[in-house]
């Protein structure tokens, strides 16, 4: 046995030369894996620029210096890469998705709260989008509530002042079935928390919409986020 069971840290072998090399590799792995923060899980090739300690989850079919390391964690070290195979139940922060994930059955599962051996699981998730308002009346904002979800809130922040002839604006779903906020301010930094009085089930995919109140839009920018719960079925 040349490595530890869980973190694949290399052992120093009897009469081994250059023991510091083995120790340093073990420290690099321990430093990265004790609190895993993955830069991304979607890059097909190593990034052109990286710092020691940067970590990536390697997707299937990766090339370059990641060729043949599908599914492994690549840790940048001394200008190259050290590879570790993740184990069932590891948790990691995925920076470019701004979400936490759990490693189960060979993949990183987002937003998992609890799971069962059958594959059933509970997930709390957030979808987000930044939207440039166009001139006119009500419009969808490129943010959707997925089918078979329970919605808790849809929040919004005014990034650039909302302009037009309207006095305020409202936030709801395109079919009007759920309203998250009305009379929302137009100045930069105005916001809508969008918390519903009770969680609401959505059985078909729906788009989030904004509507002007007493007038029309001419411009502005919003940052929006949908907060919802979903389930994975047993297999």
Image: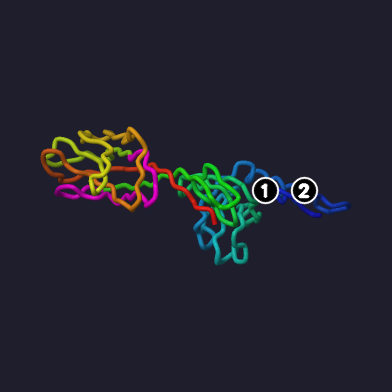
Residue at position x 65%, y 51% in the image = 87
Region of the chain picked out in magenta, as a range: 132-154
Specify the quadrant that holds the N terminus. bottom right
134 sits left or right of 43 in the view = left
In the rendered structure, does residue 94 fall within the stretch colored magenta?
no
Residue carrying label 2: 20
Count residues near mark 2 (Cα–Cα under 10 Å), then give few for <14, some for 14-19, many for 20+: few
Q: Earlier in the sequence, mark 1 or mark 2?
A: 2
Residue at position x 22%, y 35% in the image = 182
Residue 101 x, y percent position in the rendering? 53, 47
Report the Cα–Cα distance between label 1 and label 2: 14 Å
Q: Nearer the viewer, residue 169 or 47?
A: 169
- Label 2 secondary element: helix
Residue carrying label 1: 29
229 sits left or right of 103 in the view = left
Nearest-to-viewer mark from 1 and 2: 1
Q: Nearer the viewer, residue 54 or 184?
A: 184
Residue 59 x, y percent position in the rendering? 54, 60
């Amino acid at each position: 046995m040349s490595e530890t069971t869980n973190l694949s840290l290399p052992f120093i072998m009897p009469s081994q030369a250059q023991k510091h090399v083995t120790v340093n590799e073990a420290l690099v792995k321990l430093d990265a894996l004790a609190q895993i923060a993955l830069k991304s899980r979607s890059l097909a090739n190593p990034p052109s620029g990286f710092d020691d300690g940067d970590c990536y989850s390697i997707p299937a079919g990766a090339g370059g210096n990641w060729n043949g390391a599908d599914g492994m964690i690549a840790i940048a070290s001394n200008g190259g890469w050290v590879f570790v195979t993740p184990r069932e139940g590891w948790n990691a922060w995925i920076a470019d998705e701004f979400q936490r994930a759990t490693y189960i059955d060979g993949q990183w599962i987002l937003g998992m709260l609890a799971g069962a051996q059958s594959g059933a699981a509970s997930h709390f998730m957030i979808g987000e989008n930044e939207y440039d308002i166009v001139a006119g009346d009500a419009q969808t904002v490129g943010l959707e509530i997925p089918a078979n979800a329970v919605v808790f809130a849809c929040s919004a922040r005014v990034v650039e002042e909302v302009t037009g002839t309207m006095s305020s604006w409202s936030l709801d779903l395109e079919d009007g079935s759920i309203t998250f906020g009305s009379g929302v301010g137009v100045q930069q930094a105005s916001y809508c928390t969008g918390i519903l009085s009770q969680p609401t089930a959505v059985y078909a995919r729906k788009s989030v919409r904004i509507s002007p109140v007493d007038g029309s839009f001419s411009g502005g920018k919003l940052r929006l986020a949908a907060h919802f719960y979903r389930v994975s079925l047993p297999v």
